[in-house]
Image (spheres, rainbow, N blue to C red):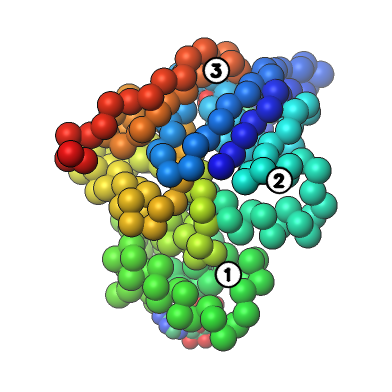
Amino acid sequence: MLSLQEVSKTYTAQGQTFRAVLPVSMEIETGGIHGIIGTSGAGKSTLLRLMNLLERPDTGKVLFEGRDLTAMGERELREARRSIGMIFQQFNLVHNRTVHGNVASALELARTPKRDRERRIGEVLEFVGLQDKAGQYPARLSGGQKQRVGIARALASSPRLLLCDEPTSALDPQTTEDLLNVLLHINRTLGVTIVVVTHEMEVVRQICTSVSVMEMGEVVDTFALPKRADEG
Ligand code: ADP
Ligand code: ADP
């Protein structure tokens, strides 16, 4: 589904250069939930943002379904990105728009025809169980509800890949459990491939089918995980 080929990223701040991601190669297989685990500063979030070109790599290629994102022009890239959803630790919702408006914003960006938008917004809000919150502003929602809005927004353009940056780090344990179940549900019922960055082994243990371990900008280990007991 996604192939990183020798991608690297260096940041320059106050005259100092810092190598956040050394040349990394990685294959994300279709259908799984791939975890990226490591301590703070290991480069996990940067690596995730290289996957949809939210960050441009200094070197290397990013192939999504066989097509090189790094070689695409703006229009082609915007088109390809409709197939790659993303959710964030701090949810990144638009505060002055309602739940409905937040999901609508994704469809506006994706240039979905107006006549198709309302139906799609209804579908994804129902999927995350927030139909009755459509008119609320984010400030009125709990953390778990905010992340569900983030998920609804990410799912609006029917992505085949969902990138999750520390999706549960701002949530309490019970809400975390609920959210991990939503991610499992997305993977199993919608067939969406998921990549999840986390510093919590528990997240990996509960939902991931494979995991890469990052340390100081490098992937130092990658392995498959045993099937969950409830999968039979
Ligand atoms: P992780 O997600 O594993 O915590 P990050 O990818 O966020 O790691 O960061 C890796 C390193 O790159 C950190 O040392 C961080 O300070 C640095 N870094 C990340 N983003 C930027 C940026 N926009 N500008 C400068 N340095 C950055
Ligand atoms: P904002 O533009 O402030 O983000 P909305 O996107 O919620 O707010 O509203 C934009 C338009 O969508 C309005 O015309 C509103 O009537 C309509 N709308 C808002 N909520 C819903 C809903 N749950 N179902 C159908 N239409 C809605």
Name the quadrant where ligand 1 sits.
Answer: top right
**Which amino acid, mark 3?**
Val
Q: Tell me the residue that label 3 is attached to.
A: 219
What residue do we see at 28% from left, 26% from top?
Answer: 226
Pointer 2: residues within 10 angstroms few (<14), some, or many (20+)? Answer: some
Q: Looking at the image, is mark 3 or mark 1 nearer the viewer?
A: 3
- Percent across and percent down for residue 215 are 52, 14
Task: Classify 114 as above or below 14.
Answer: below
- As drawn, the label of residue 107 is 1
- Describe residue 153's horizontal placement relative to residue 7 as left or right: left
Asked whether disc 2 touches disc 1, contact meaning CB atoms under 8 Å apart, the reply is: no
Q: Hey, which residue is sitting farthest bottom in the picture?
A: 115
Q: What is the distance, in whole Å, between disc 2 and disc 1 at their CAs?
A: 23 Å
Which residue is label 2 attached to?
67
Nearer to us: label 3 or label 2: 2
Looking at the rendered image, the quarter that the N terminus falls into is top right
Q: Earlier in the sequence, mark 3 or mark 2?
A: 2
Residue 73 drawn above or below residue 98: above
Looking at the rendered structure, the kind of residue marked 1 is: Leu
Mark sitting earlier along the chain (2/1): 2
| Quadrant housing the C terminus | top left
Which residue appears at 76% of the width and 57% of the height? 76
Q: Secondary structure at mark 3?
A: strand
Looking at the image, residue 53 sits to the left or right of residue 155; the answer is right
Residue at screen point 43% across, 31% down: 35
**Along the viewing direction, whichever of 17 and 151 lies nearer the viewer:** 151
Distance CA(mark 3)–CA(mark 2): 23 Å
Label 1 sits on a secondary structure element that is helix
